[in-house]
Image (spheres, coloured by chain):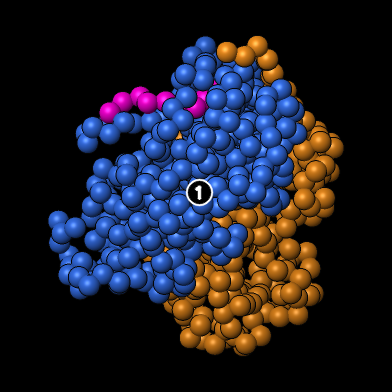
């Protein structure tokens, strides 16, 4: 019909241009690192129990290593090309700029694949993502850390922080419960926490095994052991979904203000960037607004706990 | 924005030249449904004859040009335990003809989600920048409710928007590309009479809506009615097929899966659109499902569209096209669900009875 021909020109998207046009320049490195992971080599693997291993990672590229900084409570996406990505909370000290530690339970198909690899293998990480525990605000108060099962993994980062700034905090209590004594993680560090850092550690198991001399019962039973002024205390709670409500409502009854109780939520995640919506709770993304929430925000979110 | 008037005959010549020089998609009749009504979809077109200018509505939305059902995020070349990651953001230019105002509004909402914040999506940006969008206004179908969502008109987000004013199209030109192409064709400046015809057309569109949903204060109602039996009732009907999310112009949830090539020398990371109604949407490793019941998942969909998103982005994510209502195999319609929630049906007490058969 008509002889005119006009072709729509192709517009290229350049990675670097795109990063520099990101709305927040201060978080430029995050924009750069959202789809291309930092390559890491696995420097050490510690078998904690039959189901959990502690992986020590080192970012290979020195520039990338200097870019990667995180705060206690944040998580990263660990990727194993061909198998997939998993969100894992960082359980090492954030002042350790050389190595990262991740405590991983063999649960899905990516983590199962991770359990077959050996030291020296390569993985990649994206991140860090998410919110963190307000460690600076907690300074000057007592701290109560409550962990159930694998919930000790995300609590290790704040524990390291407290260890490194021990003089800033009052009484530090760790309540740690597990199903059976053999599932208690990081037992090799208990003495260090107790003796050197004056952290009161209380452990409890649901079911005693041979040789267990400690307490048996639910995690809330441990509240009888501690006598601290709840009004001058901050709490960090992490554990299986059923634990949050029980523990937080217990703390509420003991008089702890809701905005001083922090929980670290777990959800399915596929992007870490607030785009895939898999981790959405009501109006809130666990990956961007969380995983660390104060109890007041969690109470406001339907179906959060 | 520049406004021009073009005769329908001349406009067809323009479209023909455009689709002959570019990869183009437009509404085409693909089938007939059980009510003997034509079924339209956005399909490849190679000449103006292929484009159904008088189409009613497409079954699927136009989001798949921007968010393909499957999209490769990166490729890995694997050798001796090491790998190299390759990422390609860029996509080829395409022309998409015949989007409705609500479809373009949906794109604007997706822009809001995917291009704002700390983590803008370069994949989406590449597709958005390389897509030439031509919009058409239309008289609403009986079950469209986009006026209730305030998306029956669209101010931006397109290259060219055409309003049907009888013998001519009233063009809103929103890009230099469109302006330059149109220079080759006979257009004229709108006159007073054309403006009157445009106003008439807009009134006709605006008054043509037969379905209305009251969404004022809906975020608060959703909060209050969180434990309402309404969710159980509609959840009992829901088949968890995810069709609603697939046809929705704004649903963007996805999953990311890795897969090895068959020769094990490479791997591909693919993004796949997902639906919050699918059973495993919120299942975490270890097997815990945060939304175990049908009703929970159905509720979440409404919760995200009308409350969660409203809180984050100051607008509800639903544009009111009712594609989900038409496509739902179980006959779940957003209008009925929302009206049920607002308890505005006379049969309210009946409708919250436990029997799922009553509709």
Asked whether, in this view, residue B208 is left or right of residue B15, the answer is left
Residue at 79% in and 74% down = A167
Any part of residue B258 in sight: no
Residue A66 visible to the viewer = yes
Residue A123: x %, y % from top left: 64, 32
The percent position of residue B199, horizontal first and vertical second, equals 55, 52
Q: Name the residue rendered at 57%, 13% in the picture.
A: A1
Q: Pointer 1 indicates a residue of which chain?
A: B
* Residue B146 or residue B335, whichever sits in front: B146
- Which chain comes out orange in the rendered image? A
Decide whether residue A41 is among the magenta residues: no
Residue nearest the observer in this picture, B214 or B278: B214
Depth check: give the residue in front, A179 or A239.
A239
Of helix, strand and loop, which mostly describes the magenta segment? strand
Residue tagged by mark 1?
A: B201
Q: Image point 82% across, 52% down: which residue? A: A26
Q: Nearer the viewer, residue A268 or B234?
A: B234
Q: Is residue A94 above or below residue B107?
A: below
Label 1 neighbour load within 10 Å: few <14, some 14-19, many 20+: some
Horizontal and vertical percent position of residue A44: 67, 38
Q: Is residue B30 magenta?
A: yes
Q: Which residues are magenta?
A: B24-32
Instruction: Answer with left or right where residue A227 lies relative to residue A149.
Output: right
Which of the 4 quarters of the picture holds residue A175? bottom right
Residue B228: quarter of image: bottom left
């Amino acid at each position: 019909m008509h002889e005119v021909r006009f072709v729509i020109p192709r517009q290229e998207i350049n990675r670097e241009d795109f990063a520099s046009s990101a709305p927040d320049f201060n978080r430029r490195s995050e924009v750069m690192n959202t789809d291309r992971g930092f390559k890491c080599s696995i420097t050490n693997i510690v078998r904690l129990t039959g189901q959990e291993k502690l992986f020590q990672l080192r970012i290979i590229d020195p520039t990338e290593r200097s870019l990667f900084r995180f705060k206690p409570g944040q998580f990263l996406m660990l990727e194993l090309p061909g198998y997939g990505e998993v969100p894992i909370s960082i359980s090492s000290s954030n002042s350790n700029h050389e190595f990262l530690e991740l405590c991983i339970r063999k649960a899905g198909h990516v983590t199962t694949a991770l359990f077959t690899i050996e030291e020296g293998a390569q993985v990649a990480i994206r991140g860090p993502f998410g919110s963190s525990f307000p460690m600076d605000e907690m300074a000057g108060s007592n701290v109560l850390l409550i962990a159930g099962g694998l919930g000790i993994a995300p609590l290790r980062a704040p524990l390291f922080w407290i260890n490194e700034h021990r003089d800033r905090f009052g009484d530090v209590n760790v309540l740690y419960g597990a199903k059976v004594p053999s599932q208690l993680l990081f037992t090799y560090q208990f003495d260090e926490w107790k003796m050197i850092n004056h952290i009161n550690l209380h452990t409890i198991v649901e079911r005693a095994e041979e040789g267990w001399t400690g307490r048996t019962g639910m995690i809330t039973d441990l509240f009888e052991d501690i006598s601290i002024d709840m009004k001058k205390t901050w709490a960090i709670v992490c554990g299986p979904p059923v634990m949050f409500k029980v523990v937080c409502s217990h703390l509420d009854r003991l008089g702890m203000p809701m905005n001083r109780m922090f929980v670290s939520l777990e959800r399915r995640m596929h992007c870490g960037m607030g785009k895939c919506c898999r981790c959405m709770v009501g109006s809130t993304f666990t990956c961007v607004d969380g995983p660390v929430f104060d109890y007041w925000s969690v109470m406001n979110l339907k179906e959060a706990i | 924005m520049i406004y021009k008037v073009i005769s329908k005959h001349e406009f067809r010549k323009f479209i023909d030249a455009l689709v002959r020089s570019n990869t183009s998609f437009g509404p085409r009749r693909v089938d007939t449904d059980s009510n003997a009504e034509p079924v339209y979809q956005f399909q490849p077109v190679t000449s103006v004859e292929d484009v159904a200018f008088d189409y009613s509505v497409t079954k699927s939305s136009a989001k798949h040009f921007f968010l393909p059902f499957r999209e490769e995020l990166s490729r890995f070349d694997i050798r001796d335990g090491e790998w190299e990651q390759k990422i390609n953001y860029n996509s080829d230019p395409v022309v998409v003809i015949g989007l409705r105002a609500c479809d373009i509004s949906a794109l604007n909402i997706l822009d809001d989600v995917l291009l704002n914040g700390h983590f803008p999506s370069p994949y989406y940006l590449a597709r958005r920048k390389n897509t030439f969008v031509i919009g058409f206004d239309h008289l609403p179908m009986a079950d469209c409710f986009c006026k209730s969502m305030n998306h029956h008109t669209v101010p931006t987000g397109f290259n060219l928007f055409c309003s049907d004013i009888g013998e001519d199209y009233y063009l809103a030109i929103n890009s230099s590309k469109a302006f330059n192409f149109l220079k080759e064709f006979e257009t004229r400046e709108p006159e007073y009479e054309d403006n009157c015809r445009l106003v008439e057309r807009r009134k006709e569109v605006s008054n043509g809506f037969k379905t209305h949903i009251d969404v004022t204060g809906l975020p608060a109602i959703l909060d209050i009615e969180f434990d309402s039996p309404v969710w159980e009732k509609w959840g009992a009907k829901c088949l968890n097929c995810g069709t609603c999310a697939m046809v929705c112009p704004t649903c963007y949830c996805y999953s990311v899966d890795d897969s090895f090539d068959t020769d094990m020398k490479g791997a591909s990371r693919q993004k796949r659109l997902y639906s919050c109604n699918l059973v495993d949407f919120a299942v975490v490793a270890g097997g815990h499902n945060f939304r175990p019941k049908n009703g929970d998942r159905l509720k979440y969909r409404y919760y995200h569209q009308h409350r969660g998103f409203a809180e984050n982005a100051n607008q509800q994510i639903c544009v009111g096209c009712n594609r989900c209502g038409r496509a739902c195999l179980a006959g779940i319609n957003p209008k009925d669900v929302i009206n049920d929630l607002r308890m505005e049906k006379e049969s309210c007490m009946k409708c919250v009875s436990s029997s799922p058969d009553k509709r």
